[in-house]
Amino acid sequence: MALILSLKTYSQNELENKRIFVRVYNLNGHKIGKGKIISITESMILLKRGEKSIDIDFSEIGKLKTKHSAGNNI
């Protein structure tokens, strides 16, 4: 039983360490940024794309997409 609990804990930690790729769209549906999420604060999201980093204020965000197909964003 201890082995099962330790595997579950490890898998949860592994998910926290992954950086998720997102596409960010404004309220009009136009893409304003894309990249891997570095951090999220109370007022903005920080994305990294290659060597560049982008700060996007939450008031500008209309939609976040994680994959190309619509079924993956549900």
Image (cartoon, rainbow, N blue to C red):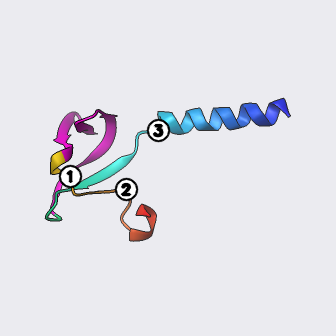
Alpha-carbon span between mark 3 and mark 1: 22 Å
Residue 67 image offset from top left, x and y in percent: 38, 60
Secondary structure found at label 1: loop
Alpha-carbon span between mark 3 and mark 2: 13 Å
Say which quadrant the C terminus sits in.
bottom left
Main SS of the magenta part reads strand
Labels 1, 2: front one = 1
Span highlighted in magenta in the image: 30-58
Secondary structure found at label 3: loop
Disc 1 crowd, CA 10 A, few/some/many (<14, 14-19, 20+) = many
Disc marking residue 18 = 3
Secondary structure found at label 2: loop
State yes or no: residue 53 in magenta: yes
Res 55 → quadrant: top left
Disc 2 crowd, CA 10 A, few/some/many (<14, 14-19, 20+) = some
Q: Residue at x 28, y 45 (%)?
A: 35
Task: Name the residue type under label 3.
Answer: Lys
Q: Residue at x 27, y 54 (%)?
A: 23
Q: Are marks 3 and 2 in contact (CB under 8 Å)?
A: no
In the shown orientation, is residue 50 left or right of residue 28? right
In the shown orientation, is residue 44 left or right of residue 21? left
Task: Name the residue type under label 1.
Answer: Ile
Say which quadrant the N terminus sits in.
top right
7 or 42: nearer the viewer: 42
Disc 3 crowd, CA 10 A, few/some/many (<14, 14-19, 20+) = few
- Which residue corresponds to mark 2? 66
Residue 10 image offset from top left, x and y in percent: 65, 32
Q: Residue at x 29, y 32 (%)?
A: 41
Residue 68, placed above or below residue 46: below
In the shown orientation, is residue 7 left or right of residue 69? right
Residue 15 image offset from top left, x and y in percent: 53, 39
Disc marking residue 61 = 1
